[in-house]
Each structure stands twice: as structure tokens, then as C-alpha cells.
Amino acid sequence: MTNDELIGSLVAQMKPVRRLPSVERRTLLWASIGLLCVCLGTFLFDTRAIIVDELRESSVVLKSGLLLLVSALAARSAFNLSVPSLGNRWLERWLPLFGMFAWFVILAVQHAAGASCVAVEDGHSLFRLGCVSRTAMLALVPSVSMLVMLRRGAPLEQRWTALLGLVSSMALALAGTEILCAKAAWSHVLVWHVGPVFAAGLAGIVLGNRLFRRNLPSDVRRVGH
Amino acid sequence: MDLDADRQLSELMRRAQDGDRHAYDVLLNEVANLVRSYVRRQLGADHNVEDVVQETLLSIHSHRHTYDPTRPFRPWMYAIARHRLLDAVGKQQRRWRHEVLDDAGIVDAGALDEAPSEPAGLAAFIRYALAQLSQAQREVIQMLKLDGYSVTEISQRTGRSESLVKVTAHRGYKTLRKLMEDEFRDE
């Protein structure tokens, strides 16, 4: 097919489109949905009785605040990447990941200072699967809505988009898990809190191309062949 | 960037998003010309140019809802074209790999009475590999290996010192070796 024929066919078949909302609007919409889900889920999972006292601790506020900030930055970067030509700045992509690393460093510093050596409540051991399933459940709706909203765009760098999208959902869920889970051993936090975020990021890198692969609409496919 | 031209393209796309077919027709024709020039600069006179142009037009058609009329048009357009170009180059490399393996199999089987002429796929890959070298490296390697000149003769002809000729050739071989390893490594 020549270019003229292709252009003629595309023009003949074209219809008005609904423009994608701005990145800021989409980020705000997703953040609202995500925050609502995580707050509701955290409440339903039964917060600890001492949560009010917990929130008075500056370290808890700092860590939770950092996780929410990471989630917002990662979401914004993912939505930027879902529009061709946006999201090309190096810092914009890596800042959320640096934020996660900073959260990890705070955790390590706390551990070194002996702040998180309190034994896990109820004799729970290192192998506490409850935190993973709780994080996964808290992340479910934010993750699905994130992927649906990203697919509405046109991510060209699919692995990066998936990585940042999933990290944003998991960081949001982790903020809830941190409130729900009793102060646990360093090894427990590392494996069962940080681990799922790391695994989700890895899944995004591996599956990114498949998650955002989109077959051209059937009318467009016919034109191109 | 020519701002007036970009504003015109942006306006055409905005009208196309609202359903103006004439604007869309003008826009796609202009996009085809711009993308063709861009791809030719990257690929040279390659038969893949028109394929990439058509893939880009199809992608622009399916992604047109993502364009924000308040932003410049050409960065958006070139971002799509660049990715379609990378896809095309990736497909071509996979095709070369497949063709080279097929050709090697025919030669090994000894099915021919006389030595075959260089397989088309392999020749294409070698041309591609040489094209990845700098002009100096390509020139030195061609003179050394294809034209049969000695290092001294190349030094006299090109005005480079003999040590520079050797270093240039060495760097070129290293690049070619890496390309060959990447292409022929089992997946």
C-alpha cells in the first residue's frame, strides 16, 4: 500500500476523539482513588489500638510521609511516560526510586539505633505471610486502576511505565501496611514489607511490554496491510 | 524549531482531534514528509524507510487522543517516529540473525557442488556492521582487509601515523567482534 492510499484510508475512517486529560488531573484522580482504598482497607484490617500514639512518633510520620511522596512522584512519572515526548527527564524517572531507597536508609538507621528491635507481637516469626497478603490486597485496586489509566495513554517506554506505575501502587499500600503491622524485626520488614515493592517493580520491568501491548484497532489494522 | 510551522501543525492536529478530515489529511501528508526526512537521516537510503513512515502514521492515528494541543507538536510526533524506527531496526537485526543461521546451515550441509556466493543475509549484516564503525575505522579496515594494503601503505596514503592506523584498526575490530558476538550468541 502506498503512503497516499494509507493516508486516504486513515482520513476516511477517522472520528473525533476524546482527549486524554492532563497528567496532573490523572495523577490527582488516581491518588484520590488509591488513598481512599488504602485508608478504607487499613481501617477494615483493624488498626492497632495504639495507632494514635504511633502517629505522634516523628519517625512513623516521616516514613509514612516519604512513602506517600514516593507514590505520588512515581505515579506522576508513570502518567508522564504514558504520553509520547513527556517523561524524558532522567531525574523525573529516578527520583521516586531514590525516594524508596531513602525510606530504606531510614529503616536501616532506625535499626542501627536499636529503634526497631522490638519483638514482633503475638510471637509472629520472620515468616509472616500476613503482611504480604495485606500489602497485595491494599495495592490491588490502586494497581488495577493505575494500569487501566496508563493503557488509556500510549506508553512508548513500556517497562519504565510499568515499573513506576507498580512502585507507586505498592508504596501507597506499604504506607498502610506500616500502620497495620506491629513494629517488627528488621529482617521481617526487609523481607515482607520491602520485598513486595521490589518484586512488583521487577514484575513491571519484565511484563511491561505485555501489559501495554496494544493491538491496533481492527479498522486501522486493515488499512495498514 | 520553527515555531510558526509547529503552531500550524498543532492547530491541524487539534482540528483533526475534533473530527476535521481536511485538516487531518493535510497534517498526515506533512507528517509523512517530516518523518521520511528524519528516518532517512538515521537509516540512509534503506528500503525500510517507507515501512517506518507507514508504521509511524498508523501509530499517530491510534495515539492521536494523547496529543495535548497546548504543547508543541513535533516533539510528540518525533517521539513516536523514534520508537517506530527502533522497532524496525530491532526487527531487521532479528531477521539478519535468522538469515545468517540459515545460510550457515546450508554451507555446513555441503549440499552445493561449488562454494556459494556470499549469502545475502550475511552480506547485509557485514554491511550493517561496517556502517556502525566510525569513518576512519571503516576506511582503515577496508584498506587493510579488502584492498590488501599494508599498514605502511595506509599510513602514506591517509597521512596518519602507523601507530594510529594500528590503533584505529584495533578499535574497529573490537567493535565488529562485539557486534558479531551479540548477533550470534544463542538466546
Image (cartoon, coloured by chain):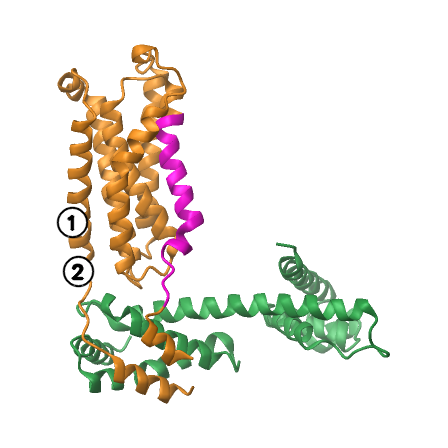
Chain colours: A orange, B green
Asked whether the viewer can see residue A46, the reply is yes
Q: Is residue A32 left or right of residue A10?
A: left
Residue ID at (32%, 16%): A116
| Residue bearing the label numbered 2 | A21
Instruction: Give the alpha-carbon distance from disc 2 to disc 1, as whole Å.
Output: 10 Å
Query: Which badge, 2 or 1, is on the more N-terminal residue?
Result: 2
Query: Are dots 2 and 1 in contact, CB under 8 Å?
Result: yes
- Which quarter of the image is occupied by the C terminus of chain B? bottom right
- Which quarter of the image is occupied by the N terminus of chain B? bottom left
Q: Is residue A206 magenta?
A: yes
Are both tags, 2 and 1, on one chain? Answer: yes
Percent coordinates x, y for residue A5 in the rendering:
36, 88
Query: Residue placed farthest to the left in the image?
Result: A52
Above or below for B22 versus B68: below
Residue A48: quarter of image: top left
Above or below for A96 versus A184: below
Q: Chain of mark 1?
A: A
Residue ID at (30%, 11%): A122
Residue ID at (39%, 47%): A204
Residue A120: quarter of image: top left
Q: Which residues are magenta?
A: A191-215
Question: In the depicted view, which residue is nearer to us: A108 or B32?
Answer: B32
Percent coordinates x, y for residue A217 in the rendering:
32, 70
Q: Amino acid at mark 2?
A: Pro
Q: Is residue A51 left or right of residue A190?
A: left
Residue ID at (27%, 18%): A182
Q: Residues within 10 Å of mark 1 (few under 14, many from 20)?
A: few
Q: Chain of mark 2?
A: A
* Disc sitting over residue A29 in the figure: 1
Q: Is residue A67 left or right of residue A161?
A: left
Q: Report the predominant secondary structure element of the magenta stretch.
A: helix
Q: Residues within 10 Å of mark 2 (few under 14, many from 20)?
A: some
